[in-house]
């Protein structure tokens, strides 16, 4: 049981450190948006594949 508790504590510490570093660094690319303003979700482009099955 103590091994599980130690693992969970380690997991919490790793996530806390990662969150703290992320907060310090800030957004990777602020204002990143699709060039066409959005639209259909990926994979719903409406490409006709003909008779492929």
Image: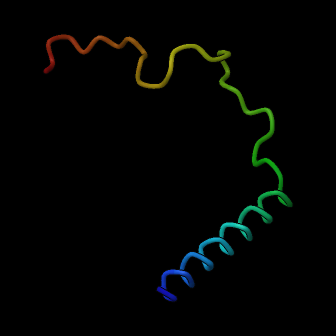
Comparing 16 with 36, the one in front is: 16
- Seen as rendered, the residue at the extreme bottom is 2
Horizontal side of residue 12 vs 5, given as left or right: right
* Coordinates of residue 40 in the picture (x, y in percent): 51, 15
Q: Quadrant of the C terminus?
A: top left
Horizontal side of residue 22 vs 45, given as left or right: right
On the image, which quarter does residue 20 sit in?
Answer: bottom right
Number of numbered discs overlaid on the protein picture: 0
Comparing 43 with 14, the one in front is: 14
* Coordinates of residue 12 in the picture (x, y in percent): 65, 71
On the image, which quarter does residue 23 sit in?
Answer: bottom right
- Seen as rendered, the residue at the extreme right is 24
* Coordinates of residue 21 in the picture (x, y in percent): 79, 65
Q: Is residue 31 above or below residue 40?
A: below
- Seen as rendered, the residue at the extreme front is 1
Q: Is residue 11 above or below residue 38?
A: below
Q: Residue at x 67, y 21 (%)?
A: 35
On the image, which quarter does residue 34 sit in?
Answer: top right
* Coordinates of residue 41 in the picture (x, y in percent): 50, 21
Question: How did the renderer colour the structure?
Answer: rainbow
Horizontal side of residue 46 vs 24, given as left or right: left
Q: Residue at x 62, y 17 (%)?
A: 38
Comparing 44 with 11, the one in front is: 11
Q: Is residue 7 above or below residue 15?
A: below
Q: Residue at x 55, y 81 (%)?
A: 5
Q: Is residue 45 above or below residue 14?
A: above
């Amino acid at each position: 049981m103590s091994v599980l508790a130690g693992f969970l504590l380690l997991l919490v510490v790793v996530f806390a450190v990662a969150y703290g570093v992320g907060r310090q660094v800030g957004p990777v690319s602020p204002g990143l948006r699709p060039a066409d303003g959005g639209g259909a979700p990926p994979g719903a482009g409406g490409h006709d594949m003909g008779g492929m099955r």
